[in-house]
Amino acid sequence: MRALSTLLLASTTLLLSGCIIHIGGAHAEPTLHQQQTLELSTEQLASLKAEVTSGFLKISGVRGQQSVQVQADIYTYKDASPILTLKPSGQRALLIAKFDNQRFYNRSPRIDLTITVPESLMLDINDGSGDIDINSVNADININDGSGGITVHQGKKIRINDGSGSIEVTETGAVTINDGSGDIDLAQIAGKIRIKDGSGDIDIEETQSTVDINDGSGGIELTQIGGDTDINDGSGSIYAEHINGMVTIDDGSGGIKVRHTKGLNIIDSGSGSLSFKDIDGPVSVED
């Protein structure tokens, strides 16, 4: 079955198409797979706000595109009511992809979203669970995520508030991350980096500005950093090399190795080995 409906909102166009496929499963009720497409003109809109609960979310910026285009794959159950809407709200496009408040017990309905947007459209993402992949967006990006991996390739200011799951950010402006757990990998970052992390390894390389890390546990590796670097670490090894600025470390436990910096200030080396050399500037070590 295939249905097509068109809704006109002022100068805005919303397109939906649906196809439902019954898939046999282990549950008493069959699983349903429904496909829908939506489109919304962005002629007078500055941002996309997405409120999604579960499923993967992939967003790609496209030069010259003048609308938000959404392809949705809905995996649900006969007794569930998926909600999928895309409409203007002030100066933003508002996308909602969720299910009603029914309890699904051991079942896991989801809505997988593949979205293209104008490359200059700002993004504000509120996501429950599932992987997020954003690329080629030349605008600020704000992500509030419960669980699932996050990948951002290209963007301006990036803000991420994450519960759990890995984070990878490349080729962006300033990055601010508040993370519960999961590894963090950053590379080719033009602006300041601020990280508050509960647990998981942190790997940062090829940056042009300062780095500020407040970490609970997990290894930290920094290479080719463009400015002063401050590290407040609970536990885990620290390796810093080729830092174009002062390195300041307050450490609880774990080995510390520092190479080729403009200065070094060890407030507390905690427990673990300490090694440094080729420091082109003042050195202060308190234990």
Image (spheres, helix red, strand yellow):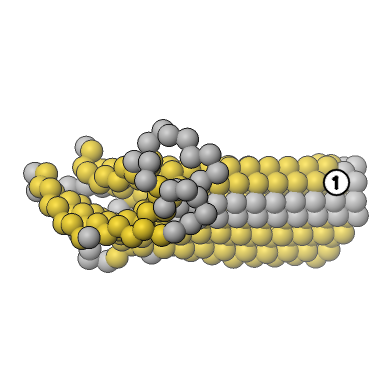
Residue lying furthest top: 101
Is residue 127 visible in the rendered image? The answer is no
Q: Quadrant of residue 99?
A: top left
Q: Is 19 placed left or right of 248 in the picture? A: left
Q: Label 1 crowding class (10 Å Cα cut-off): few <14, some 14-19, many 20+?
A: some
Give 124 or 225, whichever is nearer the viewer.
124
Is residue 180 visible in the rendered image? The answer is yes
Q: Is 76 placed left or right of 249 in the picture? A: left
Q: Is 131 placed left or right of 78 in the picture? A: right
- Which residue is painted at 48% across and 57% down in the image? 25
Q: Position of residue 44 (x, y in %)?
A: 17, 47
Q: Position of residue 155 (x, y in %)?
A: 42, 58
Residue type, numbered disc 1:
Ser
Q: Position of residue 258 (x, y in %)?
A: 79, 59
Quadrant of the drawing holding the C terminus: top right
Quadrant of the drawing holding the N terminus: bottom left
- Which residue is painted at 40% across and 49% down in the image? 76
Task: Please name the residue that numbered disc 1 is placed on.
Answer: 253
